[in-house]
Each structure stands twice: as structure tokens, then as C-alpha cells.
Image: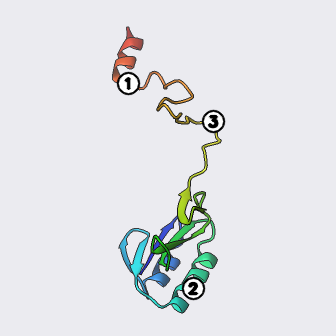
Amino acid sequence: MVVLVLSACPPGLRGYLTRWLLEISAGVFVGKVSRKVRNLMWERTVEMVKTGRAIMVVQARNEQGMDFRVHGHHWEPIDVDGLTLMLRPADTRGGKRARADGSSSSPPATGWSKAARRRRQR
């Protein structure tokens, strides 16, 4: 079983993938193909995706029963005690970051609610 998720990809790539896989939602392809076809399909996807992103989940003989392939995505698969997890990098653009206690490191934005707008009008 193969699951391939594409983001910001050219329409030609989506058409190419429909030869072997079913598109069950926009940019989400599912199907069962041989290992050789799967590898060739991934190589072609990496060539055609350009500035977009692609994540492929394939069947594997491990504890999870699956493995990940990632191209052009900021999330990356890492091995933790034999399990593959997707590492989401911390936001370094100065945005809000959640702390362990559930609070955020920057104060909440003010002026966004209807009540705040009414207060400004007074």
C-alpha cells in the first residue's frame, strides 16, 4: 500500500500519478503498486514537484509496518528507539511557541475580539 501526499505541485504531476494511484482528495493519492514502480514513481515525483512538497508512506517490515519518504518538506522523519516519528521543527520566525505548562512565550494578541473593538470605539 502506498499513500502519497502532494502540496503545491504542478497539475502534470497529479495527472502522471493517476496512472497508478487513485486521487482520493486534492493531492492525496492511494494505491498498491510493486516496489519497482513505487521507486520509479518517487524518483519522477521528486523531479516534477519543483518547489512543492511530497510525502510518501510505504509499507515496510518493521514495528510500525510503514516507512516515510519526504521531499521539500520542513517535517522530517527521525528514528526514536526503532520507531519512525515525524519531527516538526520549532517555529523560529518569532511566532508564538507553546511551553510545557501550556502557556505561550509571547503575550496574546489584543484587539482581535468584538469586545476589544467596542472598547476602542468608546
Which quadrant is home to the N terminus? bottom left
* Mark 1 vs mark 3: in front: 3
**Mark 3 belongs to which amino acid?**
Gly
Q: Position of residue 38 (x, y in %)?
A: 52, 85
Figure label count:
3
Q: Position of residue 73 (x, y in %)?
A: 59, 61
Q: Position of residue 8 (x, y in %)?
A: 53, 64
C-beta proximity under 8 Å, tags 1 and 2: no
Q: Residue at the top extreme?
A: 122
| Of the pair 89 and 116, the residue shown nearer to us | 89
Compute the Cα span from label 1 to label 2.
51 Å
Residue 11 lies, with reference to residue 81, above or below; the image says below
* Mark 2 vs mark 3: in front: 2
The secondary structure type at the circle numbered 1 is: loop
Q: Badge 3 is on which residue? A: 94
Compute the Cα span from label 1 to label 3.
23 Å
Q: Badge 1 is on which residue? A: 113
